[in-house]
Image: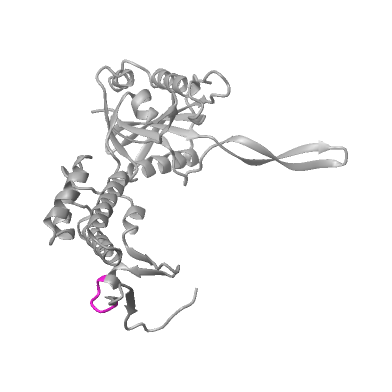
Amino acid sequence: MSDIRIDRVIIHILDSSVGIPVLSDVEVEHGSDFNDFLRAHIERIAGGDDTKLFHFHEGAEVEAWLSSLADGTADFVEVSRAMAEKLYMIMNGNPAIPPADGVFVLYEQDHEMWLAILKLNYRSGYTHMTQAGEWGNVNDLIPHRTILPGENQKLSEAALIRLSDMEIVLIEKKYEVNGQKENYFSERFLDGGASLSSKAKLAIMEKAVEKVQQDYYGEAELALEAMKAKSILQEELSEKGEIDLPFVADRIFEEAPEMREQFIEKVDKYNLTTEPIAPQSERTMKKFDKQFITTESGIEIRIPMEQYRQPGAVEFITNPDGTITVVLNNVGRLVSK
């Protein structure tokens, strides 16, 4: 991640229980600790696999405000207040959307100016309070409903906007709006459309592989084929850092063209074959590093992929009665945990 230089920051209180937004007129003085807090959230959003690419609809109000900010015809505080007020109006009419502080950050990265919109949703917790009692100080714990997420916690809604070309990446969560769950942050607040995140694309791909295999294989064969598919996906991610679905389909279904065709048909509904899926998060990649097997009696086996692919290290033998024998060869020692 390139260095991020925080330039200007303003905070608006968007607590729907109050009835009106509490908008700030003045920017925040930001020291090194607060800057580190903001950088941590910005970097987590930019490097996460929950992010989506976004485009404005024609005539979007927020795009006009951002363009005015970019060309210097509108002030940062003025634009942030307009956006915060619009966001609050959506929140105020839909109580399922959590109250929050809206933090607007103007920052520089790679010689480009960006605007971060960070919605810090409140969470409930406890804090201490000291009161003077008859016999001296009394320390107590009191509930607090407006605790903000820490720098290591993931935000539910946020956007990073490059002002030079209005390239936007965002994260969001569906909440109930007018009786139906929707992505209000992109659809109503920013007024545009967003692509699927890498995480969502991987989930759709895995589900499509699973569904096609379920349609063609019996129970015993299905488990072995599912492990083979996961091994191929992990190998592609490890070696190339991305998954090209048509190429991967050739590998997974190399001996079954009809299965490949059915798989491509499923993922094509989401336009996943036009470009590779390239996750960025190490946590996402690690998901594919191990095979997890659970027997019907509850025995769990976790096999590292390098061991799974090593010839002779793990054997799966299908018995005449349809049961499967799992053999772990050349085990040096066993450790109980």
Specify start and end residues of the magenta stretch as a single range.
309-315
Image quadrant assignment for residue 227: bottom left
- x%, y% of residue 76? 39, 22
Image location (x, y in percent) of residue 226: 27, 61
Residue 105 in view? no
Asked if residue 337 lies left or right of residue 55, the reply is: right
Closer to us: 16 or 26: 16
The residue closer to the viewer here, 166 or 260, is 260
Reply above or below: 83 against 296.
above
Residue drawn at (38%, 24%), measured in percent from left and top? 189
Query: Residue 139 or 77: which is nearer the viewer?
Result: 139
Residue 121 lies, in percent from the top left, at: 50, 34
Does the magenta portion include 312? yes
Q: Does the magenta stretch include residue 258?
A: no
Whether residue 313 is visible, yes or no, is yes
Q: Residue 172 vs residue 22: left or right?
A: left
